[in-house]
Image (spheres, rainbow, N blue to C red):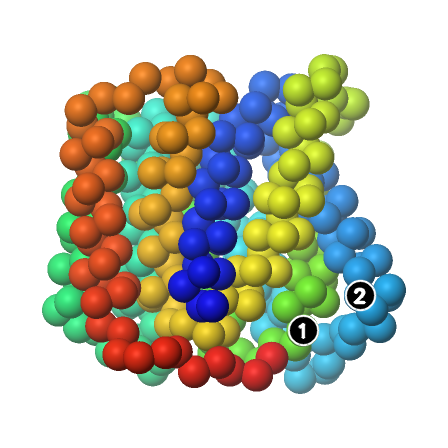
Amino acid sequence: MTLAGFGAVVLLAGSNLVVVRLSNRGLPPFFGAGTRFLAASVLLFGWVIARKLPLPTRRELPGTLVFGLLGFAGFFAFGYWGLVYLPAGIAGTLAASVPLLTLFFAAAQGLERITLRGLAGGAIAMTGIAVMLGAPATAGVAIGPVLSILAAAACDAEANVVVKKLPLGNPVSTNAVGMLAGSLILLALSAVTRESWAVPPDAATWWALAYLITFGSVALFVLFLWTIKRWTASGMSYMFVLMPLVATVLGIFILDEPVTASAAAGGVLVIAGVFVGALSGQRGPVAAKPL
């Protein structure tokens, strides 16, 4: 069940990469992301009320807010800003550092140990991402956007550790509060940067936004918290090196993107890296941790 949940998270997160590109054609990035998570939080609060789920307690609230600030506001703010200036290939390669950053952060905070297998798996997977993206040239790239993408990766890596380290409550109510906090910061950034707040101009943008709110936010992040509670933080972070595989396949059918030899060869390396770093060390079923 844990691996099935991980696979579903990868499929949903990978499809988001394609759908966000469609959404960005009609909405500014910060406004689109903030609107997405604000609407998703409203749906989740409705779920909390309908099912009478407990809200985060005073003990659980700090971890919930930190999760929202890192996983929603921090990751999407830094990521979207960096993508304004960086080619998608370079940004994708940098984002593949999430598993290694998670491994180091988790070790620094006493949750896991740094192993040669984990380091080797991360290195193989990152090599695969670079090959998939055609090893784009980095000449002329400004340091600011590069640091922004690395900051986004660091925010997500630390969010993975926070979920394992700090007490959190029900995954639905945790995401409801976390998304609300993150959306308010994203909308504030949108206002500060003077983005245009307008109704989506076409049906395609509406459909993309609807998907991102429901499947791409509500379903994805509830399932993410459910799964990571039953696995390691570094193992779960390998979703970032599998997401490009899903996005590549969907891009063929939705965005008419071509498949190159480097993409196929890189895909093999990514899968090998995930197996070495995240799967090969498992011995038997993973014990479920009560929520």
Q: Which residue sits at x=40%, y=22%?
A: 252
Q: Give the quadrant of residue 259.
A: top left
* Numbered badge on residue 62: none
Residue 170 seen by the camera: yes
Q: Secondary structure at mark 2?
A: helix
x, y percent for residue 98: 34, 54
Q: Earlier in the sequence, mark 2 or mark 1?
A: 2
Image spot of residue 143 (x, y percent): 30, 35
The residue at the point 72 percent across, 67 percent down is 173
| Crowd band around label 2 with a 10 angstrom C-alpha radius: few (<14), some (14–19), many (20+) | some
Element class at badge 1: loop
Give the x, y percent position of residue 266: 20, 37
Q: Is residue 186 above or below residue 278?
A: above
Q: Is residue 58 above or below residue 16?
A: below
* Residue type, label 2: Val
Q: Is residue 57 left or right of residue 235?
A: right
Position of the C terminus, as image quadrant, is: bottom right
Q: Which mark is residue 48?
A: 2
The quadrant holding residue 168 is bottom right
Please name the residue that numbered disc 1 is placed on: 170
**Are the residues tagged 2 and 1 within 8 Å (C-beta)?**
yes
Identify the residue at image location x=84%, y=58%: 46
Q: Is residue 113 left or right of residue 197?
A: left
Residue shown at the point (36%, 78%) measured from the top left: 285
